[in-house]
Image (cartoon, rainbow, N blue to C red):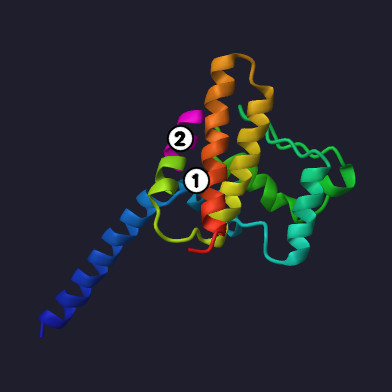
Amino acid sequence: EKKPVILPLRTWKLSLKNLSKCRLLTLYPSAYRIKRGAYSLIDPTFLHSEEDANLLFEILLAGMQIPGGGHDMQIADEELASLRSVVKLEVICEDVLPKRLSDIRRLTAELARRRRPLSWPDFERTMLTLVYAAQTLARSGSRQQREAWADAVTQLFRVLQKDLTPS
């Protein structure tokens, strides 16, 4: 009678092992860490409807900036910045997106190896990472920095283009 107990324990142990592997292989591991003391912000996504997509487009057109180095996301339009739904976008841009060039290169290498389409949250984060990389490219000073960030922007664009192109 002990075997039925051992089998479920083994199954549970194997599923925990697989879960930890999945977490290691995730594209945006920081999305699964508790942010700002809010459990609801684990694995945050901004886009849930067409209205959200329109709002994001409006925020981007208003000149949203995603600075690196621990600075807060900036939205020039105070009315847009004060919207409640913008909180999740701030968490994504400030806490989830990779900001170092080495992290973005790791991400693009992982994305290039993928054979499946991106999940909706990963597509959203990749698109926002592209926005961040393009803004960083525009602020880059040296030629070497501009070339490195231009390569990152190109790689991210190709990944998104591939994901949107039917196979």
Left or right of 23? Residue 77 is: right
Left or right of 48? Residue 27 is: left
Q: Is residue 42 visible?
A: no
Q: Residue at x 49, y 52 (%)?
A: 32
Q: Is residue 150 above or below residue 6?
A: above
Judging depth in this view, the residue of 161 and 62 nearest the camera is: 161
The image quarter in which residue 149 lies? top right
Q: Residue at x 17, y 78 (%)?
A: 5
- The residue positioned farthest toward the bottom in the image shown: 1
Task: List x then y, in percent, for residue 104.
Answer: 49, 36
Task: List x then y, in percent, for residue 126.
Answer: 56, 48
Residue type of the residue flagged with mark 2 = Arg
Q: Is residue 28 above or below residue 165?
A: above
Instruction: Identify the disc placed on residue 30.
Output: 1
Residue type of the residue flagged with mark 1 = Ser
Instruction: Identify the disc placed on residue 105.
Output: 2
Is the magenta region chiefly helix, strand or loop? helix
Instruction: Identify the disc placed on residue 86.
Output: none
Q: Helix, strand or loop at disc 1?
A: helix
Q: Residues within 10 Å of mark 1 (few under 14, many from 20)?
A: some
The total number of labels drawn is: 2
Q: Which residues are magenta?
A: 100-107
Quadrant (top left, top right, bottom left, bottom right) of the N terminus: bottom left
Q: Residue at x 49, y 45 (%)?
A: 30
Distance between mark 1 and mark 2 Cα atoms: 16 Å
- The residue positioned farthest toward the front in the image shown: 167
